[in-house]
Amino acid sequence: MKGFTSRWAARMLAALVLFAVCAPGQCAEGAKKKILYFTKSQGFQHSAVARKDGQPAYSEKVLAELGKKHGYEIVCSKDGSLLNPDKIGQWDAFIFYATGDLTKPAPEKYGDKEPPMTPEGKQALLDAIKNGKGFMGVHAGNDAFREGYDPFIQMLGGEFHSHGAQQKSWSRIVDKKFPGLEGLEDFEMMEEWYAPTDINPDIHVIILQDTKGMTGKQYERPPYPATWARMHGKGRVFYTSLGHREDVWDNPITHQVILAGLKWILGETQADVSPNLQQVAPQPEQFMAAVGGAAPAAKEPAATPAKDEAKKTGAKKTVRKKTEAKK
Ligand SMILES: [Zn+2]
């Protein structure tokens, strides 16, 4: 009985302390939500995530600052072991600007000596999201695990296909009610615009890429999803294609989009993320016609015979090689 009483007292004390340091809207230091910004590049490394002379990369500095301003602890790392089953529990959410097969080491030329993710770590990440942790992909975040229709890509809701030359293009806000984006008007920006494939039919599109006037084979398609949200089990997933150029990272619109996504994946805001692909981009069969890729599957994303066909013909890889040569 004595043991029970002291345990009960200890729990009450812990609850009181928690309440004291984390009254609503006034979370103290130490109670900050902890987010992993993962920037390992096993595939192409963007300058926005490249570290020089041991200094944080451009996007790392911007995100860390944004986190500081809004009361989040954002840990920037290329250390794949931070996702291992014994370490995954420390994170409230994950932001990925990472490329390639992240279970393999990064090329030596990038100077990243940190360990890759382990297969167990990858599974732990997917399980953590399914069980309620938040996930955000930024720009090249959908250029990871692209062999086959990987569970990572299924979770994210779409996969990088290719991009054309950097150019000015319009982004159309199709969900003006998404929390944090109220008041954001359609915007024109100079950027390297990602063209996605393997779009999961269950995504909720927030911003559409307006392809009108764009130059490049991959843009010869109807407007397509560029920023979206979806549920993955109990987890909230958000993706935005913004983030190639350093000046895009300085743009208040980028900050607004990332912050809106972050607050939502952390469960701090509530949004209606019902699938709307068919309403806002109702020509799925034309999505990839221009580049020989797959249209989104009608129901079950795992069954995409059109994609297998594209793979047999090597259409996807051909385009990819061309675009990589441009980088
Ligand atoms: Zn890029």
Image (cartoon, rainbow, N blue to C red):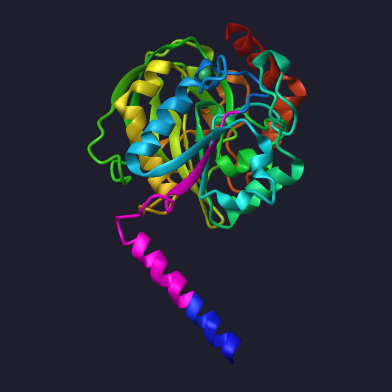
- Segment colored magenta: 11-39
State which quarter of the image contains the C terminus: top right
What residue do we see at 56% from left, 31% from top?
141
Q: Nearer the viewer, residue 239 or 16?
A: 16
Residue 240 shown left or right of residue 181 in the figure: right
| Residue 18 among magenta residues | yes
Residue 252 shown left or right of residue 313 in the figure: left
Residue 170 seen: yes
State which quarter of the image contains the N terminus: bottom right
Quadrant of the rendered image containing residue 77: top right
What residue do we see at 42% from left, 45% from top?
276
Q: Position of residue 134 (x, y in %)?
A: 51, 48
Task: Name the residue at the top extreme.
Answer: 326
Q: Nearer the viewer, residue 283 or 254?
A: 254
Q: How many numbered tags mark residues here?
A: 0
Q: Position of residue 94 (x, y in %)?
A: 53, 42
Q: Position of residue 211 (x, y in %)?
A: 41, 20
What residue do we see at 57% from left, 31% from top?
142
